[in-house]
Image (cartoon, rainbow, N blue to C red):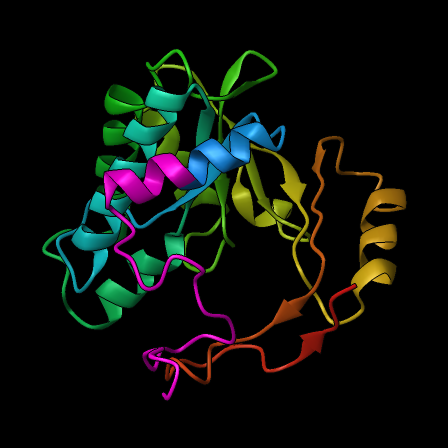
Amino acid sequence: DASGKRQIASHFYPLIDLYASGDSHVVDWQLGLMKLSGVTGVLIDWPGTANVWDYPGNAANCEAIIKGCQRVGLEYAIVYEDHNLGMARDAHMLNVTIIEQGKADMVYLRDKHMVNSNYIKLNSAPLILDFGPQTLNAGEWDQVYSVMTQPPTFLTLWNQMDQGGKAAKGEFAWIYTNYMDGLKNFYHFRSQVHLKFGVAYPGFESAYTLGGWPGPTWTIKYG
């Protein structure tokens, strides 16, 4: 535009202009600001190890952030995307079953990350969240986690712990249209969930449509 800003699929424009998520200078700056603000750890949305679509590029960016956490002294844990397994399977892009790919992903996390001193542990076990489940069912999760040396503290998205198999230990909250009412309901009810992971956010403005993806179109005002 007239001010020199480029067109991007976002409601907000970065103060430092457009950047690459794997740029170590950007990563150190972002994580450094987080640490100065009192943040002690990050949860990283991780696509898995399948060589499909943009998964490898996103995984490389995750590794860059993890290295940054080690440099600046932050803890980290992984948020898995089992939906990626289903999308790759449905597009006939996987050479193995979703169970075999899931196991390969867990072996990678077990050997590459959960051994790190700054990988977050909860109740003396490595923490792993899943944004779902959206593909794997309860019995399939049990198979996928069978490769783990130590069962992780596994949290599903809220209201979905029953789909996480024997390994599921609790749930984490997320954004929704009813905002505080939904969070209060999650915190004060669902007594069968003994481990609840909270969430805080100032607002929500969806960019799915701008990016050409299906997803929520509603907004929660900031402030």
38 over 51 or under it: above or below: above
Does residue 166 appear in this view?
no
* In magenta segment, residue 95: no
Where the N terminus falls, by quadrant?
A: bottom left
Residue stretch in magenta: 1-29
Does residue 169 appear in this view?
yes
- Measured as percent of width and height from the top left, residue 85 is found at 30, 56
82 over 17 or under it: above or below: above
- Measured as percent of width and height from the top left, residue 170 is found at 65, 36
Residue 135 occupies quadrant: bottom left
- Measured as percent of width and height from the top left, residue 145 is found at 38, 31
Q: Residue drawn 33% across and 21% down? A: 71
Predominant SS along the magenta part: loop
* Residue sitting nearer the eye, 84 or 77: 77
Lateral position of residue 160 relative to residue 24, left or right = right
Lateral position of residue 204 relative to residue 71, left or right = right
Residue 111 occupies quadrant: top left
Which residue, as the protein is rendered here, is positioned at the far bottom? 2
178 over 174 or under it: above or below: below
Lateral position of residue 1 relative to residue 76, left or right = left
- Measured as percent of width and height from the top left, residue 49 is found at 20, 44
Q: Residue drawn 72% across and 41% down? A: 198
Q: Residue drawn 37% across and 88% down? A: 2
* Residue sitting nearer the eye, 180 or 108: 180
Where the C terminus falls, by quadrant?
A: bottom right
Residue 19 occupies quadrant: bottom left
